[in-house]
Amino acid sequence: MVEKRVEAVLANPTNFLNSRRTQIVTNTVFHRLPVIYSAREWVETGGLMSYGTRDTDIYRLAGIYTGRIPKGDKPADLPVMQPTRFEFVINLQMAKLLSIEVPPTLLAIADEVIE
């Protein structure tokens, strides 16, 4: 990405990449590459921002869904369940490091701002 002079990245990390989260975030900081992730944990590690669902919400939905099967519901008859709650998290320390000025309107709609 550095060789291609990528200006920003939208990342949807997999479990494999999650296991290397600190290394990846450190590398993006080193190369001053702004990245928006799909999970807040990446922002807590030092990433710029995230927009996505919380794992706890997904696990709760999965539990509700699979709990219906032992009660007699047929899996083929169960509706597809999708998350309805998404959160937007911004890391202002990273924004400052990358010389990115986050507009007040963006800060106002963020669910959490890490300072």
Image (cartoon, helix red, strand yellow):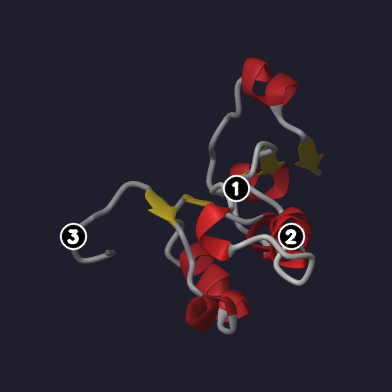
| Residue 83 vs residue 90, the one in the foreground | 83
Of labels 3 and 1, earlier in sequence is 3
Residue carrying label 1: 81
Residue carrying label 3: 4
Residue 50 spot, x, y in % from top left: 60, 47
Q: Are marks 3 and 1 in contact (CB under 8 Å)?
A: no
Mark 2: amino acid = Glu
Q: Residue at x 61, y 57 (%)?
A: 47
Mark 3: amino acid = Lys
Residue carrying label 2: 44
Q: Are marks 3 and 2 in contact (CB under 8 Å)?
A: no
Q: Is residue 104 above or below residue 11?
A: above
Residue 4 spot, x, y in % from top left: 18, 60
Question: From this viewpoint, which residue is outermost toward the left?
Answer: 4
Q: Is 61 on the left or on the right of 51, as rendered?
A: right
Of labels 3 and 2, earlier in sequence is 3
State which quadrant residue 59 falls in: bottom right
